[in-house]
Amino acid sequence: MIRSVGRTGPFKVAARVSWALRFTLLAIVAVAAVMVPIPDQIQDENATAVLSVLGIGATIFIGFRNTTAYNRWWEARTLWGAVIINCRALDNALASVDDGSDTMATVLDRMRRRQVRHAWRLAAELRGVEPPAGVSDLTPEDPADADATMLLTQQARDVRALSDADRLDPQGLVMLMSLNTALVTAQSGLERIRNQPIPVHYDLFIRLLAWFFGIMVFNRLDATSHHLWSIAIGLLVMSVFIIAERLGHFIEVPMNNTVFDLPMFRFCTTITGNLLGNGHPLARAREDARATVWM
C-alpha cells in the first residue's frame, strides 16, 4: 500500500505511481509524437464524427469499471478487518475457556500459534509468494507445507479434542467453532476476490476505449493548431483518461504482490502481536512507520 507520509509524501507517492505507469506514460508520449505530423484535415474528419458520443461512453464505462474495482478493493479490506477481529476474538475466547491445567494450556498455546501461522500463510497464498522465514516454525506440530485451509481444519480438530476430553462445555464448543467458521468465511471471500478478477475481455475493452478516446481528443485539440499549448492540453487530456483506466486496474487486484496491494503482512504483524505478544519476532513491522510503502 502506498502512503503519503511527511512533507515530501505527495512527491514520493507521485514518483511511485509514475514508476508503475512508466510504460503507459512512454506509450502516451510515443502515440502523441506519431499523431502530431498527421494532416489536420484527416484529424478533423476522424474526430468530429465520434468525439462527443464517444466521450460520454468512455466516461460511463471507465467510471463503472473503476467503481467496480474500488468495491473489490474495499471488500478485500473489510474481509481482512474481519480476519483481525476474529483472531482477537479467538484469543479472548481461548482465555475464557482456560481451566488452568497444563493440558489445556498446551492446546490453547498451540491454537494461538497456529492462528498466527494461518494469517501469514493466507497472506502469502493470496500474493503467490512464500511465507516469511519463521512462519512454518510457529507450529512444528503441523506439516511444514500445510496451507491456510488445512490450518483451520487443524484448529477445528483441536476444538473437537478438547470437547471429547470434557475440557469444553457445549457453549465453549459453539463459541470456538463459530469463530473458526467466521475465519473460513473471510478466507473464502478473499480467495474469491483474488481468483476471480474482472473478465479479461471486458478489461481489454475498457483499456482500448480509453486509448481510442484519448487519441481522438488529442487529434481534435491538435487539429485546431500546431501550437505547443494545444499539443500540451491534448496530451494532458489523453493522459487523464488512460491513467484513470490504469489506476482502476491497479486497485481491482488488491492482493497481487505489488505496491498497490493491501498491507497484508502489516495485518499479520498486528495479529502476531495480539496473540503472541509484541516481543515476538514476527510482531515486528517489516517497514518503518514513515515508509512510503507498506506490504
Image (spheres, rainbow, N blue to C red):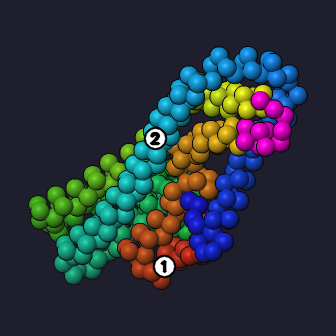
Residue 9: horizontal and vertical position, in percent?
Answer: 63, 69
**Would you say residue 223 is visible in this rendering?**
yes
Residue 16: horizontal and vertical position, in percent?
Answer: 68, 58
Give amino acid for label 2: Thr
Out of 138 and 221, give the one closest to the viewer: 221
Which of disc 1 and disc 2 is earlier in sequence? 2
Q: Main secondary structure of the magenta part?
A: helix
Give amino acid for label 1: His
Q: Is residue 36 left or right of residue 164?
A: right
The quadrant holding residue 90 is: bottom left
Q: Check disc 2 and report the residue beneath it.
A: 67
Q: Is residue 256 part of the magenta span, yes or no?
A: no
Compute the Cα span from label 2 to label 1: 40 Å
Residue 212: horizontal and vertical position, in percent?
Answer: 67, 26
Q: Check disc 1 and report the residue beneath it.
A: 280
Q: Residue at x 54, y 47 (%)?
A: 251
Seen in the picture, residue 203 relative to 16 is either above or below; the reply is above
